[in-house]
Image (cartoon, rainbow, N blue to C red):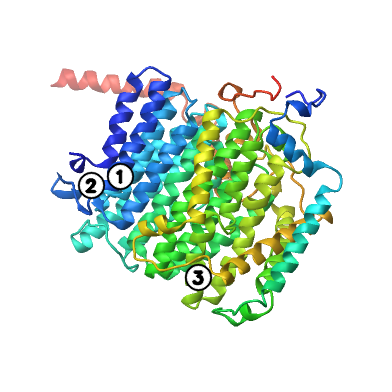
Amino acid sequence: MDTNKPDNPDSFPALGRALLWVDKPGSATKIIYALAAVCVVLGLLDFAYHKHGHFEVEYLPNFYGFYGFIMFTALILLAKTLRLFIKRPEDYYGDKAIDSETYPVDQLDEAQNDA
Amino acid sequence: MLEQLPVAFLFFAAALVLPLLPKGHLRGAVLLAIPLIAGWQVWSLPAGNLVNVEFFGFTLDLMRVDKLSRVFGLIFCLAAFLTNLYAWHIRDTVQQVAALVYAGAAIGAVFAGDLITLFIYWEGTAISSVFLIWARRTTAAYYTGMRYLIIQIGSGVILLAGVALMYNDTGSIAFEHMTLGTPATWLIFLSFGIKCAFPLLHNWLQDAYPAATVTGTVILSAFTTKLAVYALARGFAGTEILIYIGAVMTLFPIFFAEIENDLRRVLAYSLNNQLGFMVVGIGIGTEMALNGTAAHAFAHILYKALLFMSVGAVLFRTGTSKASELGGLYRTMPRTAVFCLVGAASISAFPLFSGFVTKSLIVEQTAANNYPIIWGVLVFASAGVLSHSGIKIPFFTFFAHDSGLRPKEAPMHMQLAMGITAALCIMIGVYPAPLYALLPYPIDYDAYTFGHVVTQLQLLCFALLAFCFLMRTGIHPPEIRAINLDSDWTYRRFLPKVIARVYTNISTLWGRMGAQKNRWIKALIAKAYHSHGPEGEISKSWPTGAMVIWIAVMLGITLMVSFAS
């Protein structure tokens, strides 16, 4: 696919143009701050209701939040470590696996947005 | 009249007629109409064993309709409709017929009241579905399809062996609840386990699903594994070992999904992880847990199909489904991006989306039945689902860095299929009562308690925050063009190598033994020649002249004897 053509945002669908905001400088930071604010609110909401947990850990303040954050990070780190051991080139299994072959073009419709 | 006709036969009849119809809209209409008629039939059939057939002295029960088979039958019909709508553009007769037969076989298996019928349909799903892989028509697809077929047929053969032993033990072929213990039940359990992608029996799934056609993968994602979930729920509910098997299933795929580059394979791992939740529910086996499994299977088929559809649409437009090659596609494929986000939110179990009202039934049951470690694993796996299906799929396809690709939005029929599926995901999430009413047992559950909503949002939002943190600090692993080894390496690389090595060694040994044998024989001949040859010791006293003399003597004796007599 030709990626060297000058980009023409006017040709994008309206919804796509509206979403372009996410790529503006600073937008990502704003999203992260908003998410952090939501997290703070959620953490505080933990004190706003009477808990009915099955296990004691559930009664720790913001248990689910911390568990989510820590386990997510642990997952990524472990997966990254796992990759060191099991990563292989795409053609490892040769022509007996689809990884290194291109999808048959005649079964696709690779139309361009501005075509 | 429809009561006398097994639902599956509708699909088979259509599959027979379809090739006779001209390629085009008429075929598309048949492909859409059949699942709708079948769905209406399943909906309106009364409960009971409706169709019995005599078969070599056995009474086969082709239509056992009860609440468990009905809910699976309904979602299979719905999935067949949605996937056929998604595949509206397909003009390949092989794929169209395979789609019909495959859906029909899966529905037939769900309504099978005996194990022989189950076996026939079990193999039916295997044989029909492989054509959705072969339809890609490449060398790699051929080999992948062969691997898939061997394992699927193997599962059926093991099932048959189990059924034969079962009949020998009990004299019955009824497909009812079983208790593990005899070789028969273990074989049947193993057969279900292969199709359900139990840990170490799972590789066919991640190997084969990404190798199917754009639409084939979506169709594959709905039936085979959920049929196995149904079979386990029917046959082995309350079998405790399933709780641990299921927990491992939720856990290990999330690591592989995280570092996998092919997004359709990421989704295959994710599918495996979701099956784990259902298997845990079956293992617990309480009415609520089985409700959870059925509900989660229902919701899962929809959001998983939706995710496969959105990635399929990207593959259809760009020729690749690899995360390393994609990014920034929201610009020109915004609707597909939104549908993908709905699927991602549903599988991650955000409130107001379908996963929230179904998965929690199972997780809650692990806690209620006092399995703290399993509960911890499932909550962790829920954060893991967010990581690969909730974030990775939409983020690296439609957002993240701009790949520069500017493909056209997905074709209208694909958008329609994705739109309806997305709407269903949201409807189930917002108003779960109709789904709950379909479940096998009465249910009194409110997913939307304040505490449940808050804790689930805490889990997901803090995990999202962790993702942002890892991305900003550059710790998050980048998407790279590579594959990762999984346990299928044993039969794709290791065993063939071992066999090749053994073969080489044996043939070398054989060759050496042959050579040695030749040397011995040659040495023997040489020795014999040395002693008995013309120059040999023994031939010195054995001249040719002596031979002539002896012949003359014998001739003389013969003459004398003949004269004398």
Chain of the residue that carries numbered disc 3 in the rendered image: B
Quarter placement of the C terminus of chain B: top left
Residue B39 drawn above or below residue A86: above
Chain of the residue that carries numbered disc 1 in the rendered image: B
Question: As shown in the figure, which amino acid type bears the numbered disc 1?
Answer: Gly
Q: Position of residue B511 (x, y in %)?
A: 56, 38
Q: Residue furthest bottom?
A: A56
In screen coordinates, is B407 left or right of B404? left
Q: Which residue position is annotated with label 2?
A: B62
Tell us which disc is closer to us: 1 or 3: 3
Q: Quick one: label 2, few (<14), some, or many (20+) residues within 10 Å?
A: many
- The residue at 44%/52% (across/down) is B298
Q: Which residue position is annotated with label 1?
A: B108
Residue A49 in view (yes/no): yes
Tell us which disc is closer to us: 3 or 2: 3
Question: As shown in the figure, which amino acid type bears the numbered disc 3?
Answer: Glu
Q: Which mark is residue B364?
A: 3
Q: Position of residue B456 (x, y in %)?
A: 61, 65
Mark 1: secondary structure: helix
Residue B305 drawn above or below residue B378: above
In screen coordinates, is A24 left or right of A76? right
Question: As shown in the figure, which amino acid type bears the numbered disc 2?
Answer: Leu
Mark 2: secondary structure: loop
